[in-house]
Image (cartoon, rainbow, N blue to C red):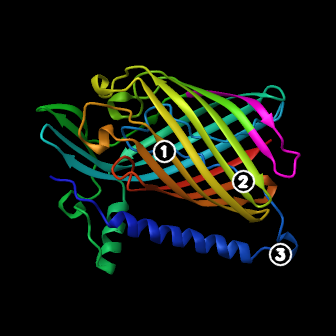
Amino acid sequence: MKYAPTDRRKSMACWLKTKWLLCFCALLLGNPPAARGATGEIIPFMVGNQSPLVQIYGLPHDTGADIVAPGGVQVALLQDLSSNYAVGSSGREEITLDGEMYRVTVAARYGLSPRWEVGLELPYIVQGGGFLDGFIFGWHNTFGLPQGGRTTAPRNHLDYRYRKDGTTLLAVDHGTTGVGDLALTGGYQLVDESDSDSPARLALKGKIKLPTGDSSSLGGSGGADGLVQLCGSRQWGSFALYGSVGALVMSKGDVLGDQHNPLAGTGSLGVGWAPVSTISFKLQLNGTTPLYRDSALAEISSPTLILTTGGTVRLPDDYLLDIGVVEDVAVSTAPDVSFHLGVSRRF
């Protein structure tokens, strides 16, 4: 089967962005007049690329430049539901990535001192055929949009498969659930100008990912990874700019080991606007250099780039609710669409 670029992705993403925007506008209009003009801190989305071949590595999910206060704890529950569908071929290779992934991550950070913090991230991963195919088909039929090849594939089906030179190098065709790779995190505050008129922060952060997940079902990579990144942010009133740059060092692992790059670069860039203290709107890009080599397929050897659109709502008792829709800007290097929900609080 040949890969066909899909207009479905664009139409689906536009509809979802409109839906979330209307929700946020309703919340904004419902705020009391006294809250208008107040400024809230804008924090990055804790998202990552949920492609089956990418999410198994220790890429950053938290690109914030803040450090938890001494003795304080930040706890976050992250949920990502992703629909993968990409089919590609070249003269020597064939790949199919068809399935849905539900990933729940518990993340915690503890402040050791005014500049140091430690933490951990533990994901639980559910992979299967899912349920979004019928919704996507119905949406496209209603508005006469192309299905992008999905009509020729089994509905709600899981099939992750890669063949090269006649040899099957990857084959996952049954649903799985289980704990993913545990990651230990840390951070050091380099700059903290949070008391200035335009608060700015700069932090050095790191991660060590351990092979606790099942690599045979893509619940993990089968190897250990190390990440170092520099995270920065600055806020001018109700507007903010934030970003990060880093390097990921990976051991060989069990997944496409002969084609796996041992080193990859990572980066993020985001902008935010907080019209009131309880709501902020955000756009965020996350990307990596290729994680694999020796392939003509975008799903394997191309740089990845995703765009998250949405925002944050501050709930009672200082809980923060992140709502985002993630698109594959670099087509075929990430899921067609992912839905992100994150709840966090500092104690």
Q: Quadrant of residue 62?
A: top right
Tell me the mark number nearer the camera, choosing from 3 and 1: 3
Q: Earlier in the sequence, mark 2 or mark 3?
A: 3
Q: Which residue, given by chain and number where applicable, does mark 1 sit on?
A: 103
Relative side of 118 to 100, left or right? right
Tell me the mark number nearer the camera, choosing from 1 and 2: 2
Residue 296, image x and y in percent? 23, 39
Identify residue type, mark 3.
Pro
Identify residue type, mark 2.
Ile
Residue displayed at 21% across by 54% down: 3
Most foreground residue, 334 or 99: 334
Image: magenta residue range: 183-201
Q: Earlier in the sequence, mark 3 or mark 1?
A: 3
Relative side of 195 to 187, left or right? right
Residue displayed at 39% across by 41% down: 303
Most foreground residue, 8 or 331: 331
Residue displayed at 26% across by 67% down: 147
Q: Which residue, given by chain and number where applicable, does mark 2 sit on?
A: 42
